[in-house]
Structures are given as C-alpha cells and as structure tokens.
Amino acid sequence: MNIESQLNSSVYESLFDLLPQAVVLLDGELRVRLANKAASALFQVPQEQLGERPVSSLIRHRDIPKLILEFGEEPVKVIELHPEPDQEAHPSTILKITIVRLRSVTPVPKLTSDQEFRLLVLEDITAKVLLEEQLVQAEKLAGMGQLAEGIAHELGNPLSSVSSNLSYIRSVLTTNGHVTLMEPLDATLANLQQMHLLLRSLSEFTGQPQPHYEPANLHTLIRRSLVFIAKEAEQHGIELLVSFADPVPLCSVDGRAITQVLLNVFKNAIEAMPEGGRISVGTRLSPPVLEGNEALVIEIQDSGRGIAESELRKVFRPLYSTKPRGTGLGLSFCRQVIEEHGGEIHLSSQRGRGTTVTLLLPVRQDVTEGAAG
C-alpha cells in the first residue's frame, strides 16, 4: 500500500470511528474487520479486541448469519432483532440493524476489494420498544376499564335480583318443609356469589384496590383451591400431587385474591392438558429475598403442552392470550395481585414439556394488618 493509500485509510478509519452510531464492517466470512468506538460501547468489548471476531459471537442469534448474508435485489435491508434468551451480554437489548452490501471498499489495511463486505449500522431500540409496549398496555387498560364498568352495571344488578329472589324462595321452601330442595338452591346461591366475586375482580383489576391483609395459612388456601378443581381434573384424567414444606408460618395476605390467583393458575394448567397429565404443587420457605422479608414459595408445575419461547414474554400482558377463546385477563390479574402483595410471579415453560408457575409471597406486610380494601 503506497503512502497516499495509507493516508486515505487513516482518514477513513478516523471518520468511521467518529460516527455516533455503532458501525461494524464484516468480511465475506462475517468476521469483524472494522468497528468503531460506538460498537465497542454497545457490545462492551474493547475496540482492539473486536477485530477478526465472528459476528455471531457479538450478536447471539441463531439466524444472524442467514439474516446478514441473504439479500434480494436491494443493496440495503433493515431488521429488528431480539436476542436469544440465553444471551449473556445485554439479554434485554433489542437491536435495529441496517445492513449494507458492499462489493468493494476504500483501501483499508488487510482488506482487499475483490470480496463482498457487509456494513452493519446498529441501534439499541430497547427503550423505544418498551415505551411503545407501555403505551399499548395503557390503551388496553383504559379500554378494559370501560368494559369492566359496563359489565358490572349490566350484570351486577340482575345477579343481585336473582340472588335475592332465590333467597326468598329458599326461606319459603324451608318453612313448608321442602328440605330436599335446599342443597341445589344452596349450590346455586354459592355459584351466584362466586359470579359476584369474579365481577368485582374484573372491576378491581382496572382500578387500584387495597388488599385486605389477614394472617392465613397458605397451605389451607391451596387445599381449598385444589378441592374446587378436583372434579374437573378427574374428568380430564389429571393427577394432582402435593408436596408441602412443614411447618410454615402464617402469611399476611388477601385470602380471597390469592385464592383467585391459585384458581387461575390451576385452570390454565388443566386447559393445557386436554388428554390428561399431572399437576404438582409444592411449597418451601425462602430466605429473605423480598426486601429482607421471608417469603413462601409456591411452585405449580404441569405436564402440558407448554408455551413457545416467543410467547413467554407476552403472557402477562393484558388482553393477550395463547388460547383461541382466552380473554387475556387471567395471568395479568395474577401478576397484579402478587405484586400488590410485594411478591413476585415467574413463569417458565418448554414446548411439549409443560409449564411451571412460581409464586413468591412475603410472610409479613408493611401495612397495618387487616387494612380495608
């Protein structure tokens, strides 16, 4: 390379380095030949260590070679890339990548112009995507508020009337000695009460209700929930397995809300196993992990069809459902209730190998016990 070429190379490399965007030049084997300071900052790799590295070691996505190499007739294409879940560096980064196909390049040391290169301009759009998702969720929640208000108004009053009439009929039948009719009437009244609770839960989901905390044995709440779904599980050929830690302290919780969370999780598990399977429920006491507070861990595992990786990050969104007739409210409600308790909810799944829902609930609450909700 002559002196003029060396000067040109030095100028172009300096300009390349001054670009505010992360820019990487790849050779035909998709190895880094040039990378500027912005790329070094994006990948958190010293600039001098980027040279000769394969791009797959920087952008860990199974399809990255194919996405970079395959072009149509256009010389430029733009892709949005979500990293693989096991990516160690920047696991939550979402990249917008502009790829330019170059048949020749201005003379740069150790580069020849007789091969094809790829110029990558990378932009971290994580904050932008998350903001857009938050706006979409806010719009959905606003719509849900209107929906909940309409449902509560249209169904609440008729249900109260039906319940009142049935209570009156029950009192008359009791007076006349028709004891045999009490059991079906009581079951109907209990179902009406459950419908009222569900309507209230839907209304509270869009508002900010204060939980009513009381000391409760979570094992008792779990057992009651299992009794409630036992018949349906039996009809679907589903085995219920329980493994409780013993003893465990009483937890300060809103028993009604936590029971609804458990029923939602169990219902999802049953629907994931239409041909039978197994639901395993286990508990254990965790060391102080929730702001220094001891937590009880409830783990609910099914052997169902599982959830695809692409859907896992969406399942807690309001109105998002993986089921054809799902409302998309169940897991959103669960997360809201658990987080209101100062706890955490986690979901892991493998397609064809089942799903595990893990609930962490603090033993104590910072608010006054029995605060009204």
Image: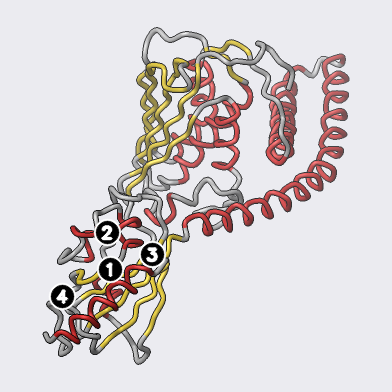
Q: What residue type is disc 2 on?
A: Arg
Q: CB under 8 Å between callouts 3 and 1?
A: yes
Q: Earlier in the sequence, mark 3 or mark 1?
A: 1
Q: Residue at x 23, y 89 (%)?
A: 104
Q: CA distance from mark 3 to mark 1?
A: 9 Å
Q: Considering depth in this image, is 180 or 144 the residue closer to the camera?
A: 144
Q: Earlier in the sequence, mark 4 or mark 3?
A: 4
Tag 4's secondary structure? loop
Q: Considering depth in this image, is 316 or 7 the residue closer to the camera?
A: 7
Tag 1's secondary structure? helix
| Residue denoted by label 2 | 60
x then y, percent, for residue 270 = 46, 40
Q: Earlier in the sequence, mark 3 or mark 2?
A: 2
Q: In the displayed structure, would residue 128 be above or below residue 69?
A: above
| Residue denoted by label 3 | 81
283 left or right, relative to 226? left
Tag 3's secondary structure? strand
Circle on res. 29:
4
Q: Hey, which quadrant is residue 358 in on the image?
A: top left
x then y, percent, for residue 303 = 34, 41
Q: What residue type is disc 4 on?
A: Glu
| Residue denoted by label 1 | 64
x then y, percent, for residue 1 = 11, 85
Q: Residue at x 17, y 79 (%)?
A: 28
Q: CA distance from mark 4 to mark 3?
A: 21 Å
Q: Hey, which quadrant is residue 195 in on the image?
A: top right
Q: What residue type is disc 3 on?
A: Leu
Q: Residue at x 59, y 18 (%)?
A: 253
Q: CB under 8 Å between callouts 4 and 3?
A: no
Q: CA distance from mark 4 to mark 1?
A: 13 Å
Q: Nearer the viewer, mark 4 or mark 3?
A: 4
Q: Nearer the viewer, mark 4 or mark 1?
A: 4
